[in-house]
Image: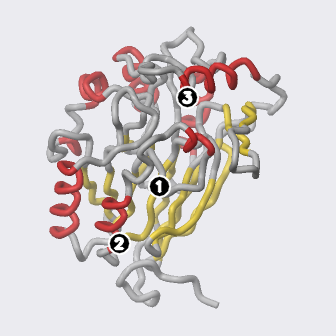
Amino acid sequence: MPAKSFNNHSPDSRTTTMFIVQLTDLHVVEPGTLGHNGTDNTKYVAHALSRVGALEPKPRAVVLTGDLADHGSVAEYAALRAMLDEIDVPAYLALGNHDNRANFLEVFGNEPYMAQRGAFVQYRVNLGDLDLLVLDTLQEGKIAGHFCDERLAWLADDLAAHRDRPTLVALHHPPIDGLSQLEFFEKGGDWYHALLDTLGTHDNIIGIMAGHTHRSASTTTQGIPLLVGPAACGYQAHMSLDWTRLDVTLAFEAPTMYLHRYADARITSHLIPASAEFSTLRPPYAEHLEKLVDSMQAPDVNLSQGVLK
């Protein structure tokens, strides 16, 4: 049975094969320091990006889908910029709940693809036979995603102007429920409905890339594949199947990435290790899970300032 095509191009149409790497939840820290999870996140990310730079054939792009920095500091973004400068692969970045928009733009705001971003970090990049569309779901100081009327209007205008372009969307927060028990704390979880309604009116959207959950997952929404990547910083969240309560175990694993292959009007995604040099023999960090629960239940806590989430 032939694979399903997710846009208005015939499965018989032939396009140039391209590979796009997705890394998410990097939580980069300043060199020589540890992240809020007690590990050297930057070391994990450096290994992952080194693997990206060595891939053959060379990827068309590496897309980083949010939580780029652990505390959202200028120094952390500068550390990430230095690592990206070491690889010969174009990088495109989205913001997550750990990020700080102003500090990010201080380091990355002069990138050519940022020229048409508007007030938020939203932009489109022509990769050849495929466009990348990056959306901004950051609501600073909050864990949950947000997509306001201004961002929605920008999206509607952009999609209307590019109806004939196969488009792969990248954002941080998965625009769907049922993927993470963090939803127990993410109030206002209907933020994504208007976003999906807008995307769903366009048949040239071939997929959505997201992060946030620290665990890989896949589903479809509005008939569009949704691919949620695991964390590149090394710690993943194992979720219980009992969705009536919060039950999360943190595990330290080798950094992992998605390798998306676009050809013949469809996308095929492979989950592959980003480094063979890390073992999973890390001790459990139960105290960090307790900190997670306590911090998220505290009133008016600023969740962008290094509190585990």
Residue ID at (52%, 19%) = 307
Left-right relation of 238 to 233: right
Of 277 and 252, nearer the camera is: 252
Q: Which residue is mark 2?
A: 200
Density class for disc 2 (Cα within 10 Å; few <14, some 14-19, many ≥20) is some
Amino acid type shown at disc 3: Lys
Q: Depth-wise, is mark 1 or mark 2 nearer the camera?
A: 2
Q: Is residue 146 above or below residue 303?
A: below
Q: Is residue 162 visible?
A: yes
Give the crowd class for mark 3: few <14, some 14-19, many >=20 residues within 10 Å. Answer: many
Q: Distance between the Cα atoms at labels 2 and 3? A: 30 Å
Q: Position of residue 122 (x, y in %)?
A: 26, 47
| SS of the residue under disc 1 | strand
Q: Quadrant of the N terminus?
A: bottom right
Q: Earlier in the sequence, mark 2 or mark 3?
A: 2
Residue 74 on image: x %, y %: 34, 17
Q: CA distance from mark 1 to mark 2?
A: 15 Å
| Residue topped by disc 1 | 209
Specify the quadrant of the image occupied by residue 142. top left
Amino acid carrying label 1: it is Met
Q: Is residue 222 left or right of residue 247?
A: left
Above or below, comparing residue 26 to residue 22 in the picture: above
Task: State which quadrant residue 110 falls in.
Answer: top left
Number of disc labels: 3
Kindly identify which numbered label has been placed on residue 309.
3
Circle 2: element type? helix
Left or right: residue 248 compared with residue 223: right
Instruction: Please state the horizontal and vertical placement of residue 245, each as a whole percent of the image.
Output: 70, 42
Q: Earlier in the sequence, mark 3 or mark 1?
A: 1
Instruction: Tell me if residue 277 can be seen.
Output: no
Q: Which amino acid type is marked by label 2?
A: Gly
CB contact under 8 Å: marks 1 and 2: no
